Amino acid sequence: MHELQYSSPTSVDEALEMLGESSRDPRVLAGGTDLLIQLRSGARHARLLVDVKRIPEMNVLHADARTGLRLGGAVPCALVGEHPAARELYPGLVEAAELIGSTQIQNRATVAGNLCNGSPAADTTPALLALDATCTIAGPSRRREIAASELVTAPGRTVLAANDLLVEIRVAAPARGSADAYQRLIPRSEMDIAVVGVGASVTVDADGTCTAARIALGAVGPRAFLAEDAAASLVGTKVDEAALVEAGRLASEAAQPISDKRGTAEYRREVAGVLTRRVVAEAARRGRERI
């Protein structure tokens, strides 16, 4: 047994200083809904918890049709779901945020924490990838921007160093005719981990032709990833049934799931295609309403 210390800094610089104390094995505490369980089970270890919820910069939540979305690293999922502009502009991301655990969990869990936990089955990660989100990372000497698609490298692993901090997630304002959607399959009706999760963003022009698309798959590989061929197949189509079937087929081919007690690899591949068709259709429908 060892002593576990707790600190609650009020600035990013103060938090970075604490995270630099390697002898204390510090860990960032945003919502703690994953971290505390991992500490209790022994999957992770820490001597210092650095609670970032009192840092004003990390509690920013701003969304509008001109400047896009700014989502601080300490903003809980519940606030994202309650934000009127976020719900209107980024319904897919909101759908993902509202699927994380119970209402009580959503009041603590953060979108940034869900991403940084590095789970292949995280709900918000495919939604963020579909939106081409970027992450502002603060380190001891500089800040840098990286794509959300590059942050997770393997299950439970990210590009973040021990003394790095994800300060903010940014998403561009949706273009005219552009919208997103997210869906997952779980064995139970709620509060479960995705067997497959799919996020999509689709842009259509005035006559309903797809001009751009992004499709991200979760829980069918060691990390969430973009199904680039499936998305490319939609461009130039009316996102009709034939186009949806082809995108679903290519998404199934791109999936590289494992078999476990939650489902076989074959089943997950099939579900990836089905959900891709549904999510793309919904994103396109929403996009047409924004023409």
Image (spheres, rainbow, N blue to C red):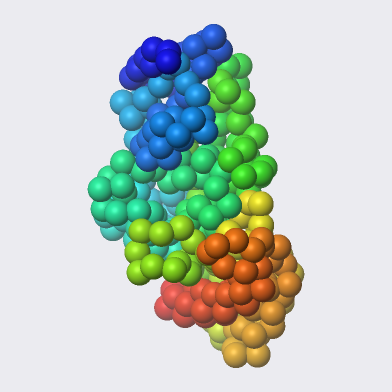
In the figure, residue 48 lies in which quadrant? Answer: top left
Q: Is residue 53 above or below residue 77?
A: above
Foreground residue among 134 and 24: 24
Q: Is residue 54 above or below residue 226?
A: above
- Tell me, yes or no, if residue 5 can be seen here: yes
Q: Position of residue 86 (x, y in %)?
A: 36, 56
Q: In the image, what residue occupies the spot 49% across and 12% down? A: 24
Please indicate whether residue 189 sits to the left or right of residue 233 in the image: left
Residue that lies at the very extreme toward the bottom in this rendered image? 241
Q: In the image, what residue occupies the spot 25% across and 48% down? A: 104
Q: In the image, what residue occupies the spot 55% across and 62% down? A: 261
Q: Position of residue 28 (x, y in %)?
A: 45, 27
Please indicate whether residue 176 sits to the left or right of residue 109 in the image: right
Q: Is residue 148 above or below residue 93?
A: above
Q: In the image, what residue occupies the spot 49% across and 61% down? A: 194
In the figure, residue 232 lies in which quadrant? Answer: bottom right
Please indicate whether residue 241 sits to the left or right of residue 6 in the image: right
Q: Quadrant of the N terminus?
A: top left
Q: Is residue 45 above or below residue 65?
A: above
Q: Position of residue 18 (x, y in %)?
A: 46, 13
Q: Position of residue 262 (x, y in %)?
A: 53, 64
In the figure, residue 31 lies in which quadrant? Answer: top left
- Tell me, yes or no, if residue 212 can be seen here: no
State the count of labels: 0
